[in-house]
Amino acid sequence: MTDTPPRDDQAHTDLRTLTTAYVNAVQARLREIPDPIAREYAARLVQEELLPDVVKQTKPVRAEAVSILKEGRTLKEVGSLTGLSIARVDQLLKGK
């Protein structure tokens, strides 16, 4: 029996499908903006504000998963399980 949690390939596939559909919808909406200045501004909004917000909003989910993995394990063991460096595991546990 291994200590490595199984990958949830279906969840990964579903998330990729949802993300692709979302990005395609955003691109289509951007292309509908007739004024090139407004279109550029809207594209910048997506790149500089909206996507970074998504990263910020998903950090707690990632940190929680790492925290659960940490229970009864060393940082090195968690790093081995996740493929992350010890320093990155530590950062995630600290909410960074």
Image (cartoon, helix red, strand yellow):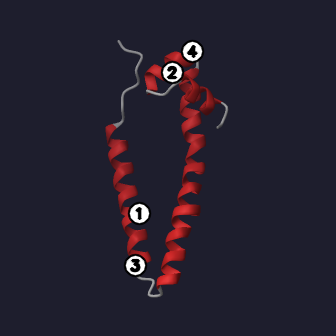
Q: Name the residue under label 2.
A: 78
Mark nearer the N terminus (4 vs 3): 3
Q: In which quarter of the image is residue 32?
A: bottom left
- Give the Cα separation between the discs numbered 1 and 3: 14 Å
Q: Which residue lies furthest to the top in this view?
A: 1
Residue under circle 3?
Answer: 31
**Marks 1 and 4, the one that precedes in the sequence:** 1
Residue highlighted by disc 4:
74
Asked which secondary structure carries label 1, the reply is helix
Give me the C-alpha separation between circle 4 and circle 3: 49 Å
- Image quadrant where one finds the C terminus: top right
The residue that label 1 is drawn on is 22
Q: Quadrant of residue 82?
A: top left
Location of residue 52 (image quadrant): bottom right
Label 2: element kind: helix
Residue type for callout 2: Val
Residue 89: percent from the left, percent from the top? 56, 27
Q: Residue furthest bottom?
A: 34
Q: CA separation, marks 4 and 2?
A: 6 Å
Dot 4 crowding, Cα within 10 Å, few <14, some 14–19, many 20+:
few
Residue furthest right in the image: 94
Q: Nearer the viewer, mark 1 or mark 3?
A: 3
